[in-house]
Amino acid sequence: FNSQEKVLGYIYKLMKKPSIQSMIFIRDNLNQLLVSNMSLKTIIYYLENKIRNEKKIKDEDRIICINYLVECELNFKKGYREIHHLEYCIVKIINYLKNRWLEK
């Protein structure tokens, strides 16, 4: 693992335990990755693979989360500010999964 993959793993771990503090850490770490020249596509690809391989997420929920990631990439192509699109996408995924897990 390189340090960027560790940071992405940490972001994914924080996504599973949402709080205001974890959102601050997620934003800081996303900003750190983008400043160190990691592309938006690489971040989205990593998150997509993590969501696909997560056994706790049902198939229909996986599809919705991956659609959020695709939407994030399309929104970035329409406008700049990668951090805003990524953060919004992550918040949508967190909210969706948290609500689904609370339904159980």
Image (cartoon, rainbow, N blue to C red):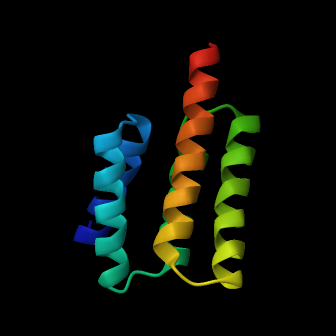
Please name whichever residue, 48 or 87, is drawn nearer the observer in this view of the structure: 87
Is any atom of residue 32 visible in this view? yes
Q: Number of numbered discs present? A: 0
On screen, residue 62 above or below 46: above
Describe residue 21's horizontal placement relative to residue 97 as left or right: left
Q: Position of residue 62 (x, y in %)?
A: 68, 43
Q: Position of residue 15 (x, y in %)?
A: 42, 43
The residue sitting at the top extreme is: 104
Q: Quadrant of the C terminus?
A: top right
**Residue found 74% across the figure and 46% down from its top:** 63
Q: Could you say which quadrant of the image residue 61 lies in?
A: top right
**Residue found 41% across the figure and 49% down from its top:** 12
The residue sitting at the left extreme is: 3
Describe residue 21's horizontal placement relative to residue 53 as left or right: left
Please name whichever residue, 1 or 68, is drawn nearer the observer in this view of the structure: 68
**Residue found 37% across the figure and 79% down from its top:** 34
Is any atom of residue 51 visible in this view? no
